Amino acid sequence: MVRVFLLVVMVGCALMTAAQPDSVWVKSYGGPDFEQANDIIACSAGGFAVVGTTGSNETGNTDVFLARFDDELNCIWSKNFGGSDVEWGLSLVEDWSGNLLATGYSSSNAGGGYDALVLKVSPDGDFMWQQSFGGVDWDFGKKIVAHPLGGFLVAIDTYNGQFGGQDGLLLHIDGQGVLLNQWYIGGSEKDGIHDLMALDNGWVACGFQTEDQIMKAAVWRFDEAGTEVWSRLTNDTLGYDRETLSMTSDGTFLYLTGPVYTSGVIHSFEQQLQLDNSVNYEVVEQEAFDVQYFDCIHFNGEIVFAGSKSLSGIEIGRVTRKRNDTFFTGAFEFTGQHRARFMNAVWNEQGLVLCGSFQPTSSQNWQALLLKYASPYLNEVGSDPEFVPCFAVGLDESELVSKGDVGQLINVLGQPVGDEFRWGSLKQENNLPAGVYFFRSAKSGNAVKQIRID
């Protein structure tokens, strides 16, 4: 089932310098429920594409959303893909024709609870096909990239592995989603893959592998045929758990980042690793606040780490810049009276773009967040975006809300304005401004319907 993603656009602009107008764009996208942007790519035809998760649908559960944006982050199209149960979108890649392939997971048609999901849409967002991969137990699609010999590589965390517990699984599929080959990664305890990167002569996967109940950061190097060339496990000297979440490469070195879980605090580590498996440098950030990075990329001659930190109990978006030897050169944060996190980053000649999620206040839902810097000056953005609601086609209005039905009423900014609202009650309706609202009814399984109050 394909549904159009309900879109609310909240736009803000912060100027870095008076001489560089419009050098920063900050926009959030959402509906009456939860949204998060999990991955972003630069498209060959210009602009960007985003995959994430939305709860703004008719089912009361979550769907995968895909969206295309121009260079100034104006939404070209946005669509939902899902069934009656839970779908989650995590990673995105473009093929040689401009089609988009996304991976994540679904429980709508999964006999084992969750199956890994791969779906493909045209450059205009038209649905082409989807495939599920899984067994009798849980499977989660984590990352999709182009295979150096054609087709695509999909990284999966599976509980249907051959080593016991959770294992990593790599799939090689063709452009129609047909399985060509597969490889399991792991040991006798819990293991997983977080990131995947294709190289000219093979690929690299990173994640974690558990030994003696200690979670160790892991990197695996493969040749084009899928044969393991080398692997590395890195454990904190004090025996703390750690895992590698993301990596990037300049063709000679790998740069990796992830969390170290100490006593109640998360520290991040950054590692520089040669492609022949010799470590050149590593640093663990020991700071007075929780900080972790979910992605890292090359930008403007530096390594940029994107993630979040906890400040006085509030999660805020954080980006740190470091030299190639991971020496600190600067940081900026997305601050204000809100919560935010950056999940992924990408750059092209237009600049650096970060995606993640944003919560304007504690009483509102999380919304998908995009922040673009069109210059190399990565200064702090210190205020909330201006809210400018704008709708696409919206939710399914073919099934009308029954007169007298009681539920939660939500305005166009995703703010609840009444938890016991009775549809058809003129007394309640006359106390509200005219306009579009959304009605979540427990009677219909928490499905959200669009209504208009005149």
Image (cartoon, helix red, strand yellow):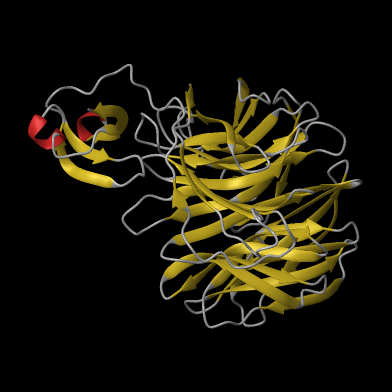
Please tell me which residue lies in front, 59 or 437.
Answer: 437
Report the quarter where the C terminus lies: top left
- Residue with the most extreme front position: 19
Q: Is residue 68 visible?
A: yes
Foreground: 119 or 296? 296
- Residue drawn where x is 29% and y is 18% of the image: 399
Residue 260 rendering spot, x and y as whole percentages: 60, 72
**Residue drawn 19% across and 44% down?**
418
Q: Is residue 143 visible?
A: no
Q: Specify whether 407 is left or right of 225.
A: left
Q: Is residue 404 above or below residue 313?
A: above
Asked if residue 398 is positioned above or below residue 333 in the image, the reply reads: above
* Rendered view: 250 above or below 179: below
> How many discs appear?
0
Front position in the image: 194 or 336? 336
Q: Position of residue 124 (x, y in %)?
A: 64, 24
Instruction: Please indicate whether residue 148 sits to the left or right of residue 246 in the image.
Output: right
Kindly identify the residue that appears in the image at 81 percent across and 76 percent down.
281
Q: Position of residue 213 (x, y in %)?
A: 57, 68
List the single residue furthest toward the left: 427
The residue shown at (71%, 51%) is 346
On the image, the x and y values in percent for residue 87 come to: 48, 36
Corner quadrant of residue 248: bottom right
